[in-house]
Image (tube, helix red, strand yellow):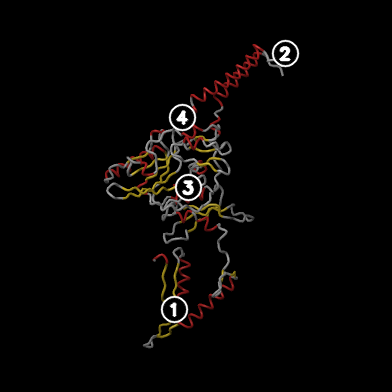
Amino acid sequence: MDFSRRQFFQASATALATTAFGFDLSRAQTRAKELKIARTTQTTSVCPYCAVGCSVIIHTLGDRAKNVKPTVVHIEGDTESPINRGTLCPKGISLKQYVVNDRRLTKPLYRAPGATEWETISWDDAIERMARRIKDTRDTGFVESDDQGRTVNRLDNVALIGGCTDTNEINYLLGKFRFGLGIVTYENQARL
Amino acid sequence: MVTVAKLIDTTTCIGCKACEAACQEWQDQPFPVGTYDGTYQTFPDVRHDFWNLIKFNEIEHADGGLSWHMAKFQCMHCVDAGCITACPAPGAIFRRDNGTVDFDHDKCIGCGYCITACPFDVPRLNPITQKVYKCNLCSDRTAVGLEPACIKACPTNCLTFGARDDLVQIATDRARTLREDGKASAGVYNPAGVGGTNVIYVLEDAAHPEDYGLPNDPTVPWTVRVWQGPLKWLGNAALVGGILGTFFHYIRFGPRHADEESS
């Protein structure tokens, strides 16, 4: 490759001019880490902890495509909620641990009286057992009439407690359940 | 691009640590078991995997009274940052267009000079990866126009995020309100020794910032300035002079030949 003296000077001057004015390499460093929630699916929900009922946005992997198994990648406050306007308390902001946690219980556990270990039972067994216990308790404690002979049809030995984040629909069903059994002692965690 | 900042109004901090949890969750860092030393503080100091610490400072007064100052502590994103001055690896610590000081961990060589040069003692070395870590003001969030995770979480409006000029104004107004309400020494902490910081505090007792775990008059150590300024150029001159001297010595006197008779 032949370089004349003139070409050499021209190339040097061009290189000097471009590096002096054209390329500010410090600007190229301003790239940021990829935003981990850039294209996630956003689902609004309610924080399950206390009675305030803060709204949260749950960010899950994928765009609801059929072949995606979504998993929670991030949870933060919902700015559109008038209750918390995006803010959350330390328990609420660490909700991801509540969802994605290898110690989370996903099956009903049963510990027999006197036993030291929990054993896994099926949902059918668990519901069957609970229904049996409720029925037996109700049969022993149901009061049809008081001592003056008036019909009362109440159940004194069972109490019901609702959760603070129960929706209207769940509360409606709980009400039906309570009236059906005749429970008179009921409370909600939101009032405690 | 507008210079962004964080305002910490310590008078409204309730020490709930939502910012700590938000930071750990967003940065995908572990939730380690804290140490217990008789206070509510999670750790005695910030760590390489724990960038955002609420300091619970208990101050006893001469008259027997007690003040409980809670203050969020993290990287201050100084306008004149000592870590950037001290860093010998080009581009490892740099300033973004929005004024935040950030690390490029691909370029960090883990020398730890930034830890010595920081007036607030914030950066921490990870002994396993041998890289230095600190708060980056959620650069991935601010780059797309979101607020940092800690600021979004704060339930008491103690933390504010926005343009630096606006926040300085808000802080000044808040300090004036506090003074009018009887907190005579309330003021803004935006130390001039480091050219101001992009993390601004409103302190109830601005005369004693050390009560909040903040240095009274932080400055970049003069040794760092001399070493990265004149001494660096002196060293470069000595290096180039040595190479040139060797070259011209070779031209003038040629290579040295072993004296055959003396051996």
Which residue is at the front of the view, A108 or B1? A108
First in sequence: mark 2 or mark 4?
A: 4
Q: CA distance from mark 3 to mark 4?
A: 36 Å
**Residue at image point 50% right, 77% down:** A134
First in sequence: mark 3 or mark 4?
A: 3
Which amino acid lies under the numbered mark 2 shown in the image of this protein? Glu
Q: Are marks 1 and 3 in contact (CB under 8 Å)?
A: no
Left or right relative to B129: residue B262 = right
Q: Could you say which quadrant of the image residue B235 lies in? A: top right
Left or right relative to A51: residue B246 = right
Which residue is at the front of the view, B231 or A15? B231
From the top left corner, tell me how far across and down residue A111 is, in percent.
Answer: 55, 72
Q: CA distance from mark 1 to mark 3?
A: 48 Å
Q: CA distance from mark 2 to mark 4?
A: 53 Å
Which amino acid lies under the numbered mark 4 shown in the image of this protein? Thr
From the top left corner, tell me how far across and down residue B92 is, in percent.
Answer: 54, 35
From the top left corner, tell me how far across and down residue A64 is, in percent.
Answer: 59, 54
Chain under callout 3: B
Quadrant of image for the C terminus of chain A: bottom left
Chain under callout 1: A
Q: CA distance from mark 2 to mark 3?
A: 79 Å
On the image, numbered disc 2 is attached to which residue? B261
On the image, numbered disc 4 is attached to which residue? B223
Chain under callout 4: B
On the image, numbered disc 3 is attached to which residue? B149
